[in-house]
Image (cartoon, grey):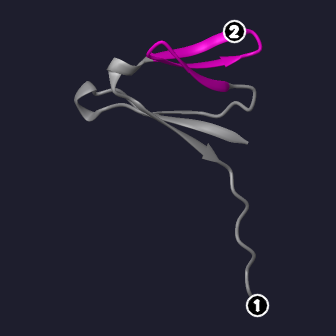
Amino acid sequence: MPAYLIVHPRDQRRDDLLIEDPALTLRFEAGWAILSDRDGVCLAIPSEQGASIQRVDEQEPAPQEE
């Protein structure tokens, strides 16, 4: 399940945010990063805010050698 990690610059003193919702899609439009689902926009972040957005994919653990 993909998730998105939103990291704000330190000087803004905002908490980082991990969003885990498989129904969300991320798109970029007119200087905005927009997370939306089938019902519409859930979160929009202006590029001037300087936040970074990373997609985090769940990975299966590597098999253990015996």
Label 1 or label 2, whichever comes before in sequence order: 2
Disc 1 and disc 2: Cα gap in Å? 49 Å
Q: Position of residue 2 (x, y in %)?
A: 68, 40
Q: Position of residue 16 (x, y in %)?
A: 42, 33
At 57% from the left and 35% from the top, the residue drawn is: 4
Q: Is residue 64 above or below residue 34?
A: below
User: What amino acid type should be assigned to the residue bearing mark 2?
Assistant: Gly
Which label lies toward us, 1 or 2? 2
At 59% from the left and 45% from the top, the residue drawn is: 56
Q: Is residue 63 above or below residue 6?
A: below
Residue 34 within the magenta-colored segment of the rendering: yes
- Which residue was labeled with disc 1? 66
**Numbered disc 2: secondary structure:** strand
**Numbered disc 1: secondary structure:** loop
Which of the two residues, 57 or 66, is positioned nearer the viewer here?
57
- Which residue was labeled with disc 2? 40
Q: Residues within 10 Å of mark 2 (few under 14, many from 20)?
A: few
Q: Is residue 31 left or right of residue 56?
A: left
Figure quadrant of residue 24: top right
User: What amino acid type should be assigned to the residue bearing mark 1?
Assistant: Glu
Figure quadrant of residue 1: top right
Q: Is residue 61 above or below residue 13?
A: below
Q: In the image as oriented, which residue stretches furthest toward the top?
A: 40
| Magenta residues, start to end | 25-45
